[in-house]
Image (cartoon, grey):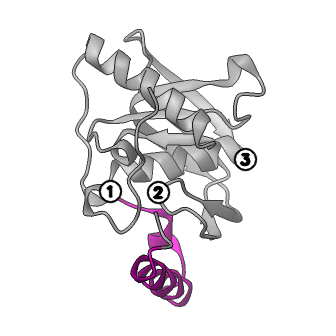
């Protein structure tokens, strides 16, 4: 089932998420619904807070469904190390229609629990590293607009407020 995605400035996006001690059938249904939601949007990643659930779950597929084995489900992801630097344009399903250049680590090592409950680590670079960092930020109540320069962030905030007043922002 496709879930509604919360949009900035919804305050629920600012609430930090809690780790899962174990994975329930309810969590597995949430994960399936998050996958459907991400592909429907379409996007390369989705964090549970974006659908109003404050659990530490992220879904990633930088191929947007073009490569069947590229889907990653990360539960309780924790970035263990980050190296290098990359600056590139980012957008967000919770801030539709707006983007900006964000500097993030070029490579990350992340520890997480799989959907099956197995603890594992994963090394990512480039776009995958960027997507992991972006989605982990969501789990901590941080949006990509928070990482923009104050000038760019204020410009986006003003445009969104105006669009909300005009009924043109979802």
Helix, strand or loop at mark 1: helix
Looking at the figure, which quarter contains the N terminus? top left
Helix, strand or loop at mark 2: loop
| Mark 2 surroundings within 10 Å by alpha-carbon count, few (fewer than 14), some (14 through 19), many (20 or more) | many
Residue located at (69% from left, 65% from top):
89
Which residue is tagged 1? Answer: 13
Which residue is tagged 2? Answer: 94
The picture places residue 25, in percent across and down from the top left corner, at 28, 11
In terms of image quadrants, where is residue 13? bottom left
Nearest-to-viewer mark from 3 and 1 = 1
Q: Is the stretch drawn in magenta largely helix, strand or loop?
A: helix
How far apart are the alpha carbons under marks 2 and 1? 8 Å
Earlier sequence position, callout 2 versus callout 1: 1
How far apart are the alpha carbons under marks 3 and 2? 22 Å
Residue located at (38% from left, 53% from top):
6
| Mark 1 surroundings within 10 Å by alpha-carbon count, few (fewer than 14), some (14 through 19), many (20 or more) | many
Which residue is tagged 3? Answer: 126
| Residue numbers of the magenta segment | 142-167
Q: Residue furthest bottom?
A: 151
How far apart are the alpha carbons under marks 3 and 1? 25 Å
Nearer to us in this view, 1 or 69: 1
Earlier sequence position, callout 3 versus callout 1: 1
Q: Is residue 39 above or below residue 42?
A: above
Q: Residue furthest front?
A: 167
Residue located at (25% from left, 51% from top):
16
Helix, strand or loop at mark 3: helix
| Callout 2 touching callout 1 (CB < 8 Å) | yes
Q: Residue furthest right?
A: 66
| Mark 3 surroundings within 10 Å by alpha-carbon count, few (fewer than 14), some (14 through 19), many (20 or more) | some
| Callout 3 touching callout 1 (CB < 8 Å) | no
| Callout 3 touching callout 2 (CB < 8 Å) | no
């Amino acid at each position: 089932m496709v879930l509604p995605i919360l949009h900035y400035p919804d305050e629920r996006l600012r609430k930090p998420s809690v780790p899962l001690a174990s994975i329930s059938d309810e969590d597995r249904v949430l994960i399936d619904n998050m996958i459907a939601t991400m592909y429907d949007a379409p996007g390369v990643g989705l964090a549970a807070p974006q659908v109003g659930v404050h659990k530490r779950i992220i879904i990633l597929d930088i191929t947007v469904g073009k490569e069947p084995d590229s889907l990653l489900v990360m539960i309780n992801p924790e970035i263990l190390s980050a190296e290098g630097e990359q600056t590139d344009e980012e957008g967000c399903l919770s801030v539709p229609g707006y983007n900006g250049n964000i500097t993030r680590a070029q490579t990350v090592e992340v520890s997480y629990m799989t959907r099956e409950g197995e603890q594992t680590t994963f090394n990512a670079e480039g776009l995958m590293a960027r997507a992991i960092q972006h989605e982990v930020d969501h789990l901590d109540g941080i949006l990509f607009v928070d990482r923009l320069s104050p000038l760019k962030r204020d410009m986006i905030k003003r445009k969104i407020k105006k669009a909300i007043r005009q009924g043109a922002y979802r």
